[in-house]
Amino acid sequence: MPNPVGDPGLGLRERKKQRTRATLVDVATRLCAERGYDNTTVDQIAEAADVSPRTFSRYFPNKEAVIGALIEDIADHVAAGLARQPFDIPEHEALVGAHLSVLRATQRGEPGAMSFDRLDGFLRIVNASPLLGLASFTYRPGAPTRAVIEALADRMGVSVDHPAVRILFDTWAVLMAAALGNPGADVGNPGVVADRIEATYEIFTTLWRPWRPQDQPPAGEPGR
């Protein structure tokens, strides 16, 4: 994971640069979530962050790169969580555990935990821009989600371009889309996100055997 903002091991100049970069990501996330991704401009992000468009361009070439940095931040936390999962469980279950550990750490306010404001903003952005969401989660080794792809490959002892990694990553993307797609006002804290992921994974594992009428999830759970 990258050095956190304010790391005393960094020089003053580098800490200021990281703070400015973090501010741009946070502001872009908030504006895109509030106004819509397509309706938010670089000039608006720069103005809200109290920097010039020229300063913005020193950190990011365009708006897409800012959202990419947001995805990288989330992916870095998930990859770190994945590295802590036991090796005697299925890979999908390890991904569930990784996401839940990250969300629970955020819920407890642990030092270095992921910002829920960023995750919540990201979910609102991709739900309002389906094409952006699809591009964000599609398997691409060089994409902002590469930290998770590389962590999966390392865990499985294969290369990042192995078919098993692609299948695993893309099926997980579908599970996440089912769990968190169009969450609306239901997603207001990390615990709710964690519960939705767990409920969707339970349905997924149920599909490993013939479906029965009693397997229909109660009203309000994913799938209804």
Image (cartoon, rainbow, N blue to C red):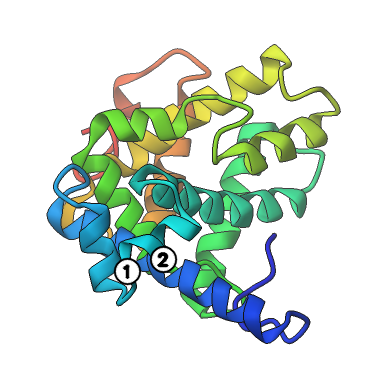
Locate residue 123 relative to residue 4 in the image: left or right. left
Residue at image position (76%, 50%) is: 83
92 vs 117, nearest the viewer: 117
Report the amino acid beneath label 2: Thr
Q: Residue 31, image x and y in percent?
A: 22, 61
Task: Examine the rendering and report whether any part of residue 183 can be seen.
Answer: yes
165 vs 86, nearest the viewer: 165
82 vs 41, nearest the viewer: 41
Mark 2 element type: helix
Report the amino acid beneath label 1: Ser
Q: Which residue is mark 1?
A: 52
Q: Which residue is mark 2?
A: 55
Quarter location, residue 120: bottom left
Q: Residue 57, image x and y in percent?
A: 42, 56
User: Do tag 2 and tag 1 residues touch (Cβ < 8 Å)?
Assistant: yes
Residue at image position (49%, 59%) is: 59
